[in-house]
Image: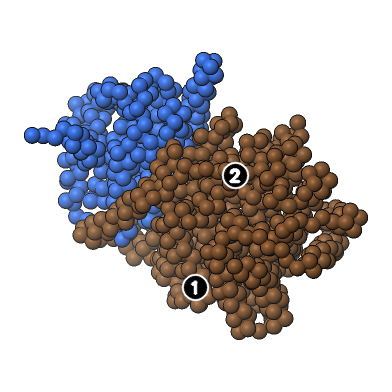
Chain colours: A brown, B blue
Amino acid sequence: MYGDTLIALTVGFPSLAGILCYALNNRVARRLIVALTAVVLIGSSILLYQGGGFEYEPAPVFDYVVLILDLALLVYFLYAGLKYSNWLVIGLAALQLFPVAYFEFGLGGMSVEPMIVVNELSIMMSLIISIVGSLIVVYALSYMDEHEHHLHIEKSKQPRFFFFMLLLLGAMHGLVFSNSLYWVYFFWEVTTLCSYELIRHDNTEIAVKNSLTALWMNLLGGVGFVAAIYIGFLFVGTISLEELTKRSAAPISLLLFATLAFAAFTKSAQFPFNKWLQGAMVAPTPVSALLHSSTMVNAGIFLILRFAPAFRGTPLSYGAALVGAFTFMITAVLAINERVSKGILAYSTIGNLGLMILCAGINTPLSYAAALTLLVFHSVSKGLLFLCAGVIENRVHTRFVEEWEGLLAKLPRTTIVMIVGMLSMFLPPFGMLLGKWMAIDAISAAPTMGLLIMLMLVLIGSAATTLYYAKWLGHMLVLPQSGKKLGNEELPLPYSISLFSLLSLSVVLGVAASSVLGAVVLPTLPMGYISYISPNLFTIETSYGSFLLYPFWVGVVAIFFVGVLIALRKGGIVKAPYVSGENIVDSPDAFMTTADTQVPMQVSGLFMDNEFSASRVLNYGVVAGVLVVMIMFLTVVL
Amino acid sequence: MVDFANLYTYIPVVLVILAPIIGGIMMGIDRKLTARMQSRMGPPIVQPFYDAIKLWGKEPFIASQLQPILAFGYFGFSIAAFTLLAFGQDMLLMIFTMAIADLCLIFAAFNSKSPYSNIGARRELIAMMSYEPVMLLAAISVFFVTGSFMVGSIYEISQPLLTILPLTFLALIPVLIIDMKKSPFDVSGSGHAHQELVRGIYTEFSGYTLALVELGHWTKITLLLAFASLFWSQNLIVGVVLAFALFFVVLVIDNSYPRLDWKTMIKTTWTVGFLLIIANIVGLIARVVILS
């Protein structure tokens, strides 16, 4: 229909809006621009969804624009490497700059037809990027004001910040719509640039250090991409995504997919490339929210899901699945010992991405649907959690979850939003658990003997996930009797808009999960993936089991109301906790010791430092991750 | 005239209503048997009901406004999980629902500032982490036999599950020990007070909230025993005997071992549970391969 307009609006508009934000250093103008971009993005992605897939050939001039910008980008990376004398960055940037230049000028480049292919998967990605991404950028309007106020920054750096935030939204759209591997690579590198610039935004020593880690790891993925382009050009004869997915899985195209999977692992921060996403949390919270939920890391998942039909049933597929399963398990274990709120969320992100890659690697219709389900629900819930964590952090001035005890009394409204977000991450009948349920079904029925290893990894991972989320949630639920509200819990308008939109989105999508499955997930399944999933009014049925969605929700509501009813009927006097009778009358949260001194009751958090040290597990994990990725390559080569 | 075909469909409903009562009776039997093992007389078998009724009528003291709601959540979700089992629904969903029930209890314990109940709640989380994956793997091993996660599908196989999955059945022993809060894995709070952490996770419950927690506990025990009885789904009586045997083994272990720490709990449950079930699955696959 208006395909070209919609492409321009989703890719071009945010990028131009970003440039405008950069040019105009004005708070009001910035707010208007961001609000307008959000409306435009959400509107056009919904129109895209209604219009369905199409192909489109942009004007040839864009070929040159992409080429020039790409080379400029690579030169800039080289410059960044030289500036901080980081040899890894220099080397990896050079490893891309010269081959790309040779590819374009020496070999004459390669164009594909058509340049833009919008299919169901890209539309689904576009919905996620537009809706969740825009809400996060809106949130950033308030957050960055508070952030700069808190850091006492005289000259606002917000123009720069919003430029890269909006550019990231545009680049992600470009990435999911392009059909040429070269264009995908270009937008891939733009997201790398955005993450690098946003992570080092505060320009502290640690921020610069972590941004360079992010840069070199993502550049490594870029090298994988360049290798894929060369293999496609020299041996397979095409770099069109559509063509590649249709080819039969010859060993050489498997190698191409393996290099792309490798690139996807770097972007989705799978082990052994987990470090950059952990480091990314030094950036202001909206950056983490955007990188973790709706953009950046999803690019890797998108790439794997896009190519999964082409390597269905091959050893590569199961190799990738193993990387994902391993990452899911180890991040869940590591998250147990993590103290920092955003750190826990980061591990949870990496783990869930691992679960998605595992599902994509199992590569059956059911597991593919599970990966898509997880992708949708994870984006919304994780976005919400990061936003809440940011608000809470700015109010209580600590990011250590142990010090978040009794938050329910201090900041009831935000805390309840956060609690709902957390429940939506790990409890049924919310969407994430629906995804996990489908995943376990699919893995158990996987046509490979490796499923036993993957099952063990997933089961241990989910047990640890429940532990680390539940203990965090428990901390927030502690209600000390001396607990008081922390002043006035007024939320500025951008906060309220983004928080409550995402909250209602995660609840509504959770309740209407079978509609989400029917309207978004099932149509997105690639050709030949005939699913046996029937989401109906009562239950979501697969060939192996049934998830009673609506009865479950009715049950949850009924149990809640009966509980409230009993609580109201029976009531009761709130008593100080039992401390062997050594209570103190006027301070209910303290007790009298044998030495007659008053000591506040305190139980420290549940961490397992004596049982396993996080840094050791991390190191072993990276080594094991390298091994697993190597095994994946070996299975392809042999 | 009584319509028997119709009557048959009411059995699950009746079972759901009876679930807490059966659990209560099992608790009474537990107290009696334990007393006999310790050469005591023991209370009458219906003693748990007397206790619960008395608790319900006590003067209400609560730790926070949220506590009664969460205490009911423990009971409510246990019933919900049992309902899924009774109606032959999905096993994975049933285990997840059990986890919600557990989490309600844990959050209720977290909800007060009490050090004892807080420590109990942390330990209960670890207990959950120990037994939940074993339980899930047990369900998956059943899936390998029946090709479905529906409880109903177990009734359709001609051979008793016990003869196909004997090791999975054994792996239920540590699960039941943890869930019944029996020695050696009663770290989060046991039936009787210990000096170390008073009653752990139960410390802050009293009166009607404690009664609700007891009801939830009974329901959960019925649920686990019902799951065990599915291992002989062809004959209900044999199934019940099987479940009772499991129950008896747990009581014997309870009375012969002292409490062990959480590290031992997690290590034992995972190694014993996982090894047994994986061995069983590998054996099944090997048999299929050899036969074909």
Of residues B106 and A97, the one nearer the viewer is A97
The chain that hosts pointer 1 is A
Question: Who's the residue at 46% across and 33% down the image?
Answer: B140
Counting residues from the start of the chain, the first of labels 2 and 1 encountered is: 2
Categorize mark 2 by other alpha carbons within 10 Å: few (<14), some (14-19), many (20+): many
Of residues B122 and B240, the one nearer the viewer is B240
Of residues A273 and A537, the one nearer the viewer is A537
Quadrant housing residue B154:
top left
Q: Is residue A480 above or below residue B238?
A: below
Question: Who's the residue at 42% across and 61% down the image?
Answer: A508
Q: Are labels 2 and 1 assigned to the same chain?
A: yes
Outermost residue toward the left? Answer: B1
Q: Is residue B22 above or below residue A187?
A: above
Say whether marks 2 and 1 touch (CB < 8 Å): no
Q: Label 2 sits on what residue type?
A: Ala
Q: Label 1 sits on what residue type?
A: Ile
Q: Mark on residue A497? A: 1
Choose mark 2 or mark 1, whichever is in front: 2
Outermost residue toward the right? Answer: A106
**SS of the residue under disc 1:** helix
Give the x, y percent position of residue B256: 36, 24
